[in-house]
Amino acid sequence: MQKRVPALLAAAAASALLLSACSGGASPTSTPSASSSAAATASPCKDTPSGSEVESVKVSGNLGEAPTVEIPAPLAIDATQRTLAVTGTGDETKTGDTVEVSITMYNAQTGAEVAPMQKAAATVDDTKFLPGFVRAIECVPVGSRVVALVDSADAFGTTGSSDSAVKADEDVVIVADILSITPDRATGEPQPEVEGMPKVTLDDSGRPTVTIPDAEAPKDLKLAVLKQGDGEEVQEGDTVSVQYQGTNWSTGKVFDESWGKQIASFQTTGVVKGFSQALVGQKVGSQVIVVIPPALGYGDAGQPSAGISGTDDLVFVIDILQTTR
């Protein structure tokens, strides 16, 4: 039964202005589902104990690969439990972190797989994902494999999952491999400025300030790499985690950004065409600047709510932090 695990585990999802070219209407201050590293210490992790029930779940296999799991179903608990099948040696995840994980989920009542293993960027944030999933991935070292037996109240509650794979009041088992913590800015090697492109300066947090040249915008999409990363190359259809800032070439005003809010995560196929073209083929760790003509942005309709007309060119500075598929 193939399902997208992050969507299944998501407690809430927000739309970004970037995603609104087709759907037409998100607020310019809204951001995609993800996390803010600035909020990483906003609240302490919950104390989730182990227990005989979760300890009875046997898990084997390599980290980052589909696990082999034996569940002595049916299992039932009154409160969520978790244990570490493998204890990593990396940095510990914190509230607000964006974490690369491999996730597999099972029905604790039947032992059946609910969603196959999938790598994803997830947020240590109860408002973004099911609390039971957050209990699994919070306050554990990178390199760990966590087994969580999640009480129904922390999972799908009295309604069950939307596909009925988990019925009302049924508990679930989650196996989560903590692969990495996503940095909050691009880490690549600075590159020479490209003539004719807007000038970018960064403050101590990494937030960009864009200065638009006293000239007309290029007629076609124009891209420059500001920092060259050496990570994995972004492919079409990947889910990427980025920091971004959008500036209107005509006014010089910032109309949308993730900086100071949340690291943004979305599929490359779910954003405006010019933004997608700026991502695909670039390497994780890179920072790019792209000038997007209206035809590859919001078209003739523009985005009036963001002060963007149908003739406005857009400038995005994008820090590419992670990609998964």
Image: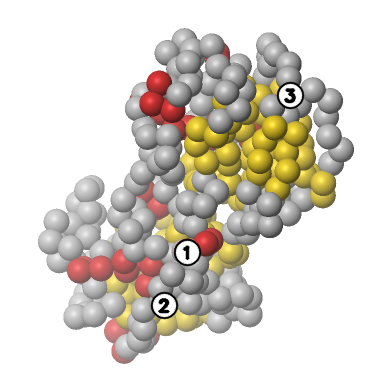
Question: Please, which residue is most extreme toward the right here?
Answer: 192
At a point 63% along the width and 75% down the height, the residue shown is 90
At a point 66% along the width and 41% down the height, the residue shown is 209
- Which of these two is toward me, 76 or 297? 297
**What's the distance in space between the residues labelled 2 and 3, CA to CA?**
45 Å
Element on which disc 1 rests: helix
Residue 115 to residue 313: above or below? below
Q: Is residue 36 left or right of residue 230?
A: left
- Which of these two is toward me, 199 or 240? 199
Which residue corresponds to mark 2? 44
Task: Point out residue 186 in the picture as x, y percentages from the top left corner.
Answer: 69, 51
Residue 204 to residue 13: above or below? below
Q: Residues within 10 Å of mark 2 (few under 14, many from 20)?
A: few
Task: Point out residue 269 in the picture as x, y percentages from the top left corner.
Answer: 51, 31
Does label 1 or label 3 sit earlier along the sequence? 1
Residues under numbered marks 2 and 3 in contact, where contact means CB atoms less than 8 Å apart = no
Q: Amino acid at mark 3?
A: Pro
Does label 2 or label 1 sit earlier along the sequence? 1
Quadrant containing the C terminus in the rendered view: top right
Which residue corresponds to mark 3? 213
Which residue corresponds to mark 1? 39
Indicate the quadrant where residue 57 lies. bottom left
Task: Point out residue 233 in the picture as x, y percentages from the top left corner.
Answer: 69, 42
Q: Amino acid at mark 2?
A: Pro
Q: Is residue 224 left or right of residue 294?
A: right
**What's the distance in space between the residues labelled 1 and 3, CA to CA?**
35 Å
At a point 50% along the width and 36% down the height, the residue shown is 256
Element on which disc 2 rests: loop
The answer to whether any part of residue 280 appears in the image is: no
At a point 18% along the width and 57% down the height, the residue shown is 160
Q: Amino acid at mark 1?
A: Ala
Say which of marks 2 and 3 sits in front. Answer: 3
